[in-house]
Image (tube, helix red, strand yellow):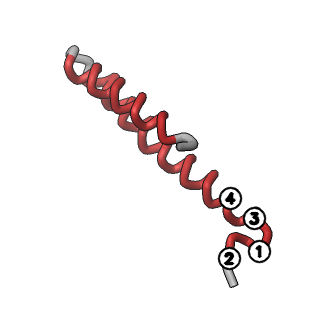
């Protein structure tokens, strides 16, 4: 599971903002979703490259 839960939380926040007339908040949450995706991906790639063999299989 790792960090997958954060995407569900952010989506819930965005849905709430849109349903309750907070378009600015929804836009910021959307920005947070993009940043979270970038950072989780980057962290995952770093972890893979730090594995013995650089994450490469022989």
As helix, strand or loop, the secondary structure at mark 2 comes to loop
User: How much space separates mark 1 and mark 3, taking CA atoms?
Assistant: 6 Å
Disc 4 vs disc 3: which is toward the camera? 3
Location of residue 40 with respect to 50 vertically, above or below: above
Query: Which residue matches tag 4?
Result: 46
Residue at 23% across / 23% down in the picture?
Answer: 18
The mark nearer the N terminus, 4 or 1, is 4
Q: Quadrant of residue 28?
A: top left
Instruction: Residue at the far top: name it.
Output: 20
Quick check: marks 2 and 4 in contact, CB under 8 Å? no
Q: CA distance from mark 2 to mark 1?
A: 6 Å
Residue located 71% across and 66% down the image: 49
Give the CA distance from mark 4 to mark 1: 13 Å
Tags 2 and 1 in contact by the CB under 8 Å rule? Answer: yes
State yes or no: discs 4 and 3 in contact (Cβ < 8 Å): no
Task: Identify the residue at the far right of this view.
Answer: 52
**Which marked residue is nearer to the observer: mark 4 or mark 1?**
1
- Mark 3 highlights which residue? 51
- Please name which of the two marks, 2 or 4, marks the residue nearer to the observer: 2
Task: Name the N-terminal-most of marks 2 and 4.
Answer: 4
At label 1, counting other C-alpha atoms closer than 10 Å, the crowd grade (few under 14, some 14-19, many 20 or more) is few
Give the structural element (helix, strand or loop) at label 3. loop
Q: For the residues labelled 3 and 2, say whether their Cβ atoms are less than 8 Å apart.
A: no
Residue for badge 2: 56
Residue holding disc 1: 53
Position in image of residue 43 (x %, y %): 63, 51
| Secondary element at tag 1 | helix
> Which image quadrant is residue 15 in?
top left
Q: CA distance from mark 4 to mark 3?
A: 9 Å
Q: Compared to 41, does 53 lie above or below?
A: below
Whichever of callouts 3 and 2 sits on the residue coming sooner in the sequence is: 3
């Amino acid at each position: 599971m790792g960090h997958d839960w954060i995407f569900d939380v952010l989506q819930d926040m965005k849905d709430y903002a849109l349903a309750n007339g907070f378009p600015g908040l929804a836009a910021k949450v959307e920005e947070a979703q993009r940043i979270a995706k970038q950072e989780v991906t980057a962290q995952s790639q770093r972890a893979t490259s730090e594995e013995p063999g650089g994450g490469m299989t022989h």
